[in-house]
Image (spheres, grey):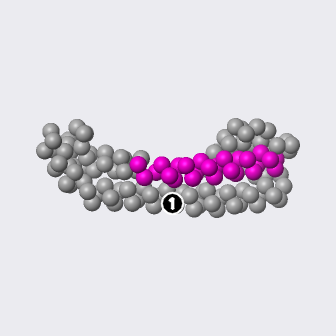
Amino acid sequence: GFLKGTGIQFATFILMLEEIVLNIKTFLIVFMAMLVMFAMLYHVLLKDHDVDGAEWGSYPSSIWAVWLFSLGQFDDSAFPNLESQIIFSIFALVIIVVMMNVLIAIVSDSFASAMSRSEPLFLRARVDL
């Protein structure tokens, strides 16, 4: 649209944002499904434990706690037994390490695609104006 015809750097930025939003949909579905899976695991495992720092009594609070884990906010007191510590180790490996690297790869590919197509799209947008 109009924003793509204003300047080549800004046009590239807008194109990059469009590419990222389009390419990230599948990642978000998989990421959210994995968060819900780990939240259900913790809810079933720890719903009867009195744990400081994480609330496992309901599904929404379990999902919220796992969301905060994915952002890096967690405390050792949230894992009172060996099973919960093992699940967190798997969570950290899968969600924090693997999925975040996949996200970085998606954004990098979208950026590279936008950079390779930026000049022709900018010139086409300028012609449309």
Q: Secondary structure at mark 1?
A: helix
Relative image position of residue 2 (x, y in whole percent): 22, 37
Tell me, yes or no, if residue 35 can be seen here. Answer: yes
Q: Is residue 28 left or right of residue 118?
A: right
- Total labels: the figure holds 1
Question: Where does the C terminus fall, quadrant-wise?
Answer: top left
Residue 11: % across, % down: 25, 46
Query: Which quarter of the picture shows residue 92?
Result: bottom right
> Which residue corresponds to the image point at 75% horizontal and 51% vertical from the top-left?
41
Name the residue rendered at 81%, 50% in the picture. Answer: 45
Q: Quadrant of the N terminus?
A: top left
Q: Main secondary structure of the magenta part?
A: helix
Q: Quadrant of residue 62?
A: top right
The magenta segment is 22-46
Q: Residue furthest left?
A: 127
Say which amino acid is labelled 1: Val
Residue 77 visible somewhere in the drawing: no
**Would residue 93 appear left or right of 1 to someone viewing this image?**
right
User: Where residue 36 sits in the image (x, y, percent)?
Assistant: 66, 47
Q: Which residue in the structure is indicated by mark 1?
A: 102
Asked whether residue 122 is drawn in magenta, I would say no
| Residue positioned 77% across, 45% down in the render | 43
